Image (spheres, rainbow, N blue to C red):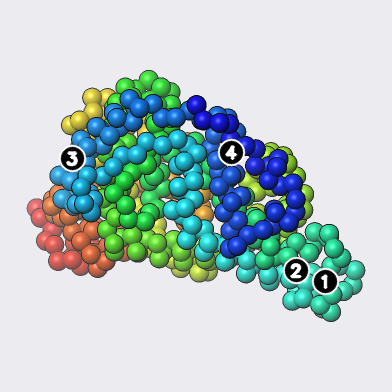
Amino acid sequence: MNEPEPNPFAGLFGEVAKLFASAGPVNWDIARQVARWMATEGLAETNVDPLCRIRLEELARVAELNMAEATGLPTSSAGPVVARAVGRAEWAERTLDAWRPLLEALAGALSQGMEATSPGEAGDAAPGGAAGHGVPPPPGDPEQLVGGWAALLTPLVLGLQSGSMVGQLATRAFGQYHLPVPRAPADELLLVPANIGAFAQDWSLPEDDVRLWVCLDELAHHTVLRLHHVRERLEELFRSYMSGFNPDAALLGERMSNLDLSDLASMQDALGDPDALLGEMQSPAQKAVLPTLEALAAALEGYVDHVVDRAGRRLIGSYDSLAEALRRRRVERAEGERLVERLFGLELGQDQYDRGAAFVAGVVERAGEEALARLWESARTLPTPAEVDAPGLWLARIELPDHRP
């Protein structure tokens, strides 16, 4: 058994200087400690059972063979994909590392929004009639955190928020593609046996059936997202969306001034509201990129569901019961999941999944299963928002005939 996770809100925040110390736009030390704490709820996390690890590796090999056949795409660069069973804390840490470039894009947007309220720049920021004269607020005043100390506050806020939301996500994720966010190329999959086993038990499903479905789903995502042009396009869209946030600096400063850093509940209350961190409305820049991001994500999820369904029905005895349980799990997402989805512009409600399913069904109905192989062929064949809603337009653009009578 591993040692209990240290409480990051006790010793870590003992000194203000250490609290604000950061060598970059996000305080990653704080993010990792908070993520581990949230992932394990501060309790000791047992090591993965070796027998469970071996079984997942066996099932991953079965899944890889079936996904290679179903997609017609290579699943790895060299050799078989390695299924790596990890605990929730390790999943959280490695996910933070994988998402680091995107979270730092958000940090840039947050920093700019807070600096806009700097006492030396904003006419109403300084207290006591000092507005417009560039007079800094007195030491210790909360306004100073919002204005003059914006460069120090931003890494702390992003460290706390990033760690909190990724830690919460670690308690639910089956694998690394809980959200369809690309990761750096690697021929491995992170799987979380504790969450897989809990889901199987909650729904009275055979655990091996759930394990195999998770392997199929993760490998289907991995097969598509490892393609350079797909990964590059999604990363570009995510980065553009996250850079476009226009946070409410005044509200964020007020919440931070009331934050008790020794109290986990206080931290969750202060930063748990996405509007406090991200702003209540989407900026024009985000509205411009969102339709393309939503359409590509819908097509990806529709495709993954399609190929997993084809393979799963042949391989999994309890597939119908499992599919219904998974559908309900998607609908009943936790608040932490919704915050992460909003952060990336991926609010994947049932409408989005239905949209993707309808696109894939339309392609297959008009041009057969083989037409789906063209979907991820190149950057040119990725569907546009209009084409996701009208599959015939996509088929016409890539010059595939419609075979319907």
Q: Quick one: SS at disc 1? A: loop
Q: Nearer the viewer, mark 3 or mark 2?
A: 2
- What residue is rendered at 29% in x and 28% in y? 55
Q: Are marks 1 and 2 in contact (CB under 8 Å)?
A: yes
Task: Determine the CA span between mark 3 and mark 2.
Answer: 57 Å
- The amino acid type of the residue labelled 1 equals Pro
Task: Determine the CA span between mark 1 and mark 4.
Answer: 37 Å
Q: Which sits in the foreground, 289 or 47? A: 47
Q: Which mark is residue 37?
A: 4
Position in image of residue 43 (x %, y %)? 58, 30
The residue tagged 3 is 66
Task: Determine the CA span between mark 3 and mark 1.
Answer: 64 Å
The residue tagged 1 is 136
Q: Are marks 3 and 4 in contact (CB under 8 Å)?
A: no
Vertical position of residue 216 compared to residue 250: above or below: above
- What residue is rendered at 73% in x and 56% in y? 17
The residue tagged 2 is 148
Instruction: Answer with mark 3 or mark 2, whichever residue precedes in sequence.
Output: 3
Judged left or right of residue 187, residue 253 is: right
Vertical position of residue 220 compared to residue 327: above or below: below
